Image (cartoon, helix red, strand yellow):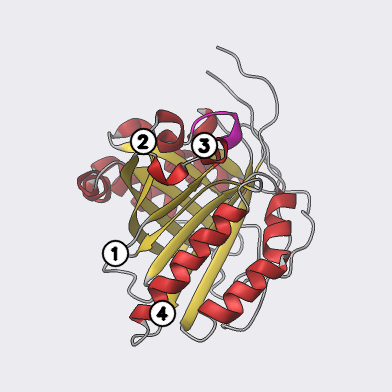
Amino acid sequence: MLIQAHCSTLSPVSLTNATRQFPIISRPAPFNVYRSNGAVSSWLGRKKNRGVIVSASEEQSSSPNLQKRRKIIEHICLLKSKEDLSDEEEKDMLDYLYTTQYQMRGIVAISLGRIGNQNPDKYSYAFYLRFQRKEDLVKFYQHPFYLGVLKDHVSPYCHELLNVDYESEVEDDILPIFRKGEEFNFGVEFVLLISFVNNASDHVEDALVSLEGLLMGFQSLIVQSTQGVNFNPSSKEYTHGVVIRFRSFDAFEIFFGSSEYKDLWKSKFEKITQKTLSVHFLIQPVGSEIM
């Protein structure tokens, strides 16, 4: 199966960088890099703990809370590249990261691309993976192929990476688990990392439940959303992770520009949030599928 994919870079978005900022959304600029196996695609063209779920299929159910759930493990890796990274170096790095899904078992979904917004820590690329079990994630970190990719195809181009892992739940069905189907072929992949203050555990639960409820109220804009407690010991600066697949850049723009989101952040998150980091990249395949 072969699907051509192309994405456009998104211009800067600032999302609660200190704890008092709200997103400033602007229109896409004309370049970016993307890959995702939601379309079982190959990337061909480019220019320079409480886990929760919101899923598109729930929109069609009168009783979404009664649907069976399957636990999954979400892995987020952010990379800081050197400033003079060439087109060929970028392609080499992303190609090898993308092929990890074919070299080991346990990876059920993947997307990666050049980050489309400025962020204070200056991360350049995002790499997202989904696993069925924690054991699969452990094997991934130790797998000779992945270690070789880091050594030969990532380290020469990047000087720092950040890993965040958390457990969440999705509908117990093949499409939401494997992020397959037309709805996963395009949109915006959004990643939010949060560090909550130490003495706010009760308020954290309330804030995350409120965010879940808000996302469910915007199901026309969102394909799927997960969130959970970070259990990666190498990235203790962030306590929680969130991954949201928006249906389009317009949907992304509408959500973060909404008064509902701004009011929620101000009332539930602002006083208990120590640090946040948000990044996104655009997913927009073009062309036809050849079997």
Check disc 4 and give the amino acid type: His
Contact (Cβ within 8 Å) of mark 4 with mark 1? no
> Which residue lies most toward the top here?
291
Residue that appears at 74% across and 64% down = 25
Q: Which residue is mark 1?
A: 232
Quick check: 182 above or below 75? above
Label 1, residues with CA under 10 Å away: few <14, some 14-19, many ≥20 = some
Mark nearer the viewer, 3 or 2: 3
Quick check: 220 above or below 19? above
Does 183 appear in magenta? yes
Spatial CA distance of label 1 from label 2 is 25 Å
Q: Earlier in the sequence, mark 4 or mark 3?
A: 3
Residue that appears at 43% across and 43% down = 97
Q: Which residue is mark 2?
A: 172
Q: For mark 3, give the secondary structure.
A: loop
Contact (Cβ within 8 Å) of mark 1 with mark 2? no
Q: Quadrant of residue 118?
A: bottom right
Q: For mark 4, give the secondary structure.
A: helix
Q: Earlier in the sequence, mark 3 or mark 2?
A: 3
Q: Quadrant of residue 108?
A: top left
- Residue 139 appears in the picture as rendered: yes
Q: Main secondary structure of the magenta part?
A: helix
Q: Which residue is mark 3?
A: 61
Residue 46's x, y, as percent?
67, 40
Does 211 appear in magenta? no
Check disc 3 and give the amino acid type: Ser
Spatial CA distance of label 4 from label 2 is 29 Å
Contact (Cβ within 8 Å) of mark 3 with mark 2? no
